[in-house]
Amino acid sequence: MGALGQIGSELTPKLRSIYGEDNVIASDIRTPNYSRTNEGRFEIHDCMDIKKTASIVKKHKIGLIYNLPAILSATAEKYPQRAFEINLLGLYNTLEVAREYKCAVFNPSTIGVFGDTTPKKNTPQDTIMRPSTMYGVTKVSGELLGDYYYSRYNVDVRGVRFPGIISSDTLPGGGTTDYAVEIFYKALKKKKYTSYLKAGTYLDMMYMPDAIKATINLMEIESAHLKHRNAFNVASMCFDVEELAAEIRKHIPEFILSYKIDPVRQKIADSWPDGLDDSEARDQWNWEPSYNLESMTADMLSKLKSKLWH
Ligand code: SER
């Protein structure tokens, strides 16, 4: 069970293919329009409604909740109060229901938990976390809450710190890393893209199949293997917009990159690491990504080409 959004809409069909169609209940505040998710069992649900969360968990005998509702970094700066409610109070509701009904919880975190005082290069698993965004504040608090519910109530809460997620099937919304998806659409349709982040702004990114793999692998590992829980650094590629454009140019040589900087998103990106050290995830639950910048770019372009023109 879990709310949808970018990860949920791709995680749901994958979970159904592994655990059986009837064993995965998707939920969201509205009926999703992505057909693959529509095909299975679904409940309309607002994560702020703790009674409804409890009744769905009870009705379907849920054992694991993927807590995916989130307002991402850039939107959270526009609506900080709403972000606090969804990202933190929504999680609190989920944890309370998980405590009562003895469910495990996947609680995704983010590279946004880090801030200006965090070591920028090879950012360690355990390090300074003083984020300056509402997104970061809610997510670092969510990590602490997850660990608290584990040690105090034995609720099996786990999470990863997702970087920007790149997908050919679903669009991100309201994040600082969204450019890394938009650029592919513009490259194919217009052969040009105007970046809102400066050249030299390095951020961790991940291709969706690896994000799904990380989620499933972390939740499947025996609890005894884990020294950390909330949340693991995971990494697979790190680039700036120039490196991504250069990779796209290998397929579309006439592609042109220009700039119009958005100060809000630039400031957020500047406060985030230039690349995470994910050795703890590799050691504790065998994390290993399948895609790098080159293979992700080739796959994105070929999938989007067939989607846009067929
Ligand atoms: N993709 C997220 C954002 O940009 C980072 O986790 O807000």
Image (cartoon, rainbow, N blue to C red):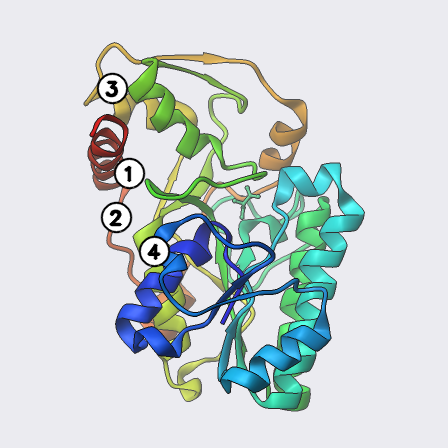
Q: Residue at position x 36%, y 26% from top?
A: 185
Q: Which amino acid does label 2 sit on?
A: Tyr
- For badge 4, the amino acid type reads Arg
Relative to 195, does residue 153 appear above or below in the rendering? Answer: below
Cβ atoms under marks 4 and 1 closer than 8 Å: no
N-terminal of the pair, mark 4 or mark 1, is 4
Q: How far apart are marks 4 and 3 (CA)?
A: 32 Å
Question: Counting residues from the N terminus, which is met first, the one under dot 4 or under dot 2?
Answer: 4
Label tally: 4
N-terminal of the two: label 2 or label 3? 3
Q: Is 306 placed left or right of 169 in the picture?
A: left
Give the label on residue 291, or none.
2
Q: Which of marks 4 and 1 is in front?
A: 4
Earlier along the polypeptide chain: callout 3 or callout 1? 3
Please give the residue where the numbered disc 4 appears in the rendered image: 36
Q: Where is residue 104 in the image (x, y as percent from the top left)?
A: 52, 81
Label whose residue precedes the other's in the sequence (4 or 3): 4
Q: Regarding mark 2 in the picture, which secondary structure is present there?
A: loop
Alpha carbon separation for disc pair 3 and 1: 13 Å
Image position, residue 264 (x, y; %): 67, 29
Neighbor class of circle 3 (other Cα within 10 Å; few <14, some 14-19, many 20+) is some
Judging by the rendered image, the residue that carries numbered circle 3 is 249
Describe the element under mark 3 as helix, strand or loop: helix
Secondary structure of the residue carrying tag 4 is helix
Q: Which of marks 4 and 3 is in front?
A: 4
